[in-house]
Image (cartoon, rainbow, N blue to C red):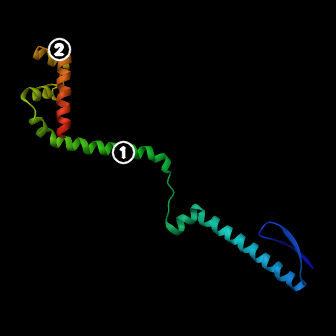
Amino acid sequence: MKIKYRLSNGKTIEVEVTAEQAEVLIAVQRTAKSNDRKFEKRRAKEASLSYLQSEFGWEPTDESAGIEETLEREERERQDIIRAEMEKRLPDLIAMLTEKQQALVRLHFFENMSLRQIATIYGTDHKNIGKQLQTIYKKLKTFF
């Protein structure tokens, strides 16, 4: 009996075998195919969500939908931490300013006066008040 045998280089050759050898070869090929099918079924099962849930308690999550929300939440938390730290240190930082600078900060940030209103009080231009507040901001930033 002749059987076709595929070599590792891809070529196929015919080989003369006995009937008994052919039966063994056919049985081995059937077993190999059966094992391959069982392996593929097991692999598919293990990749299924129900298997992961039952065996490992894993629950699927839609992480793509929550990434943006998570980033926004983390940014808010970071801003809250910075704000809390600034609120703790702000009185000490303001105390380091001159009396006039402290007054400008109080009028603009705590009494919500516009630059023009403050300029009227000091008898100067609102642009000058804006520059002074920028100087104060830079000074506070170096301390913080």
Q: Residues within 10 Å of mark 1 (few under 14, many from 20)?
A: few
Q: Residue furthest front?
A: 9
Task: Check disc 2 and give the amino acid type.
Answer: Asp
| 1 or 2: tag closer to the N-terminus | 1
Q: Nearer the viewer, residue 57 or 14?
A: 14
Can you tell which quarter of the image residue 77 is in?
A: top left
Q: Is residue 31 left or right of residue 100?
A: right
Secondary structure at numbered mark 2:
loop
The picture places residue 104, in percent across and down from the top left corner, at 13, 25
For disc 1, the marked residue is 73
* Vertical position of residue 27 compared to residue 53: above or below: below
The picture places residue 112, in percent across and down from the top left corner, at 18, 25
Residue ID at (26%, 45%): 81
Can you tell which quarter of the image residue 139 is in?
A: top left
The C terminus: image quadrant: top left
Q: CA distance from mark 1 to mark 2?
A: 41 Å
* Vertical position of residue 63 compared to residue 40: above or below: above
For disc 2, the marked residue is 125
